[in-house]
Image (cartoon, rainbow, N blue to C red):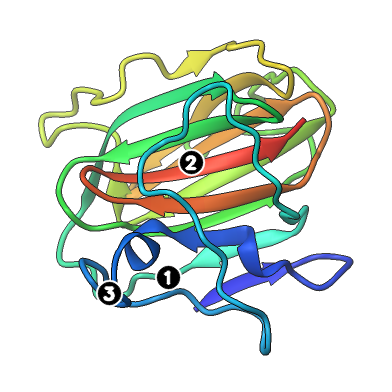
Amino acid sequence: MIIALGCSPAPADNTLNANAIDGPAGEGSSGPLTSEPGTPTPTATRTEPPAEDFADFEGTAGITEKKYPNIKGIARMSEVRSARHGNYDRVVFEFSGNEMPTYHLEYIDRPVRACGSGDVVPLAGDGWLEVRFSDAQAHTPEGEPTVKDRSRSPNLPIVKDLKITCDFESEVTWVMGVALPNRYRVIELKDPVRLAVDIKH
């Protein structure tokens, strides 16, 4: 079940499951995501679109959450990347294995703090979008980070900073420092497992 909260009703295309869209219903997926009653299920491509593509989506500035309580193990984050697209910036969180962990996204207030030390994490921009994964890790069993660059400044039109603030007790949290707290959408992708976050310009 997806929770999308905000000042206005959550848009149906806020969270998309590319696996349920790419082929016949249910093929290669655990089932379609829920949407607002009476609203058609949105569509999306399975692969990440080229940088010149433009996407017409409403998105949300509220909370987006999807729970996967039956995940069989810990989802290990293997890569994080960001890029400018036609009219939005995209950040992709990639995982090894074949299961998506539970995730929660919301704009948060300053100060942004690291989960262990409580230290303030400086971030550029006028908005801070937190992306939190449960039943996930960004390090090996030996403690080696699986995502090496944990603090980066892509300086895209919207995404200015991207920093990890937690990788502790099976919780991984990244916070994006964005130029403005614009509306965003979330897309689930497979082969490999990825969560793409698109933020409007």
For disc 1, the marked residue is 67
For disc 3, the marked residue is 30
Q: Residue at x 36, y 48 (%)?
A: 46
| Residue 90 % position (x, y) | 56, 32
Query: Please, what is the three-letter code of the amino acid marked with disc 3?
Result: Ser
| Image quarter of residue 52 | top right
Figure check: 155 above or below 92: above
Figure check: 179 above or below 4: above
Query: Please, what is the three-letter code of the amino acid marked with disc 2?
Result: Thr
Of helix, strand and loop, which one carries label 2? strand
State which tag comes first along the sequence, 2 or 1: 1
Q: Nearer the viewer, mark 3 or mark 1?
A: 3
- Front-most of 87 and 94? 87
Q: CA distance from mark 2 to mark 3?
A: 25 Å
Q: Residues within 10 Å of mark 1 (few under 14, many from 20)?
A: some
Q: Residues within 10 Å of mark 3 (few under 14, many from 20)?
A: few
| Image quarter of residue 84 | top right
Of helix, strand and loop, which one carries label 3? loop
Left or right for 87, reference 75: right
Mark linked to residue 26:
none
| Residue 99 % position (x, y) | 23, 58
Of helix, strand and loop, which one carries label 1? loop
State which tag comes first along the sequence, 2 or 3: 3
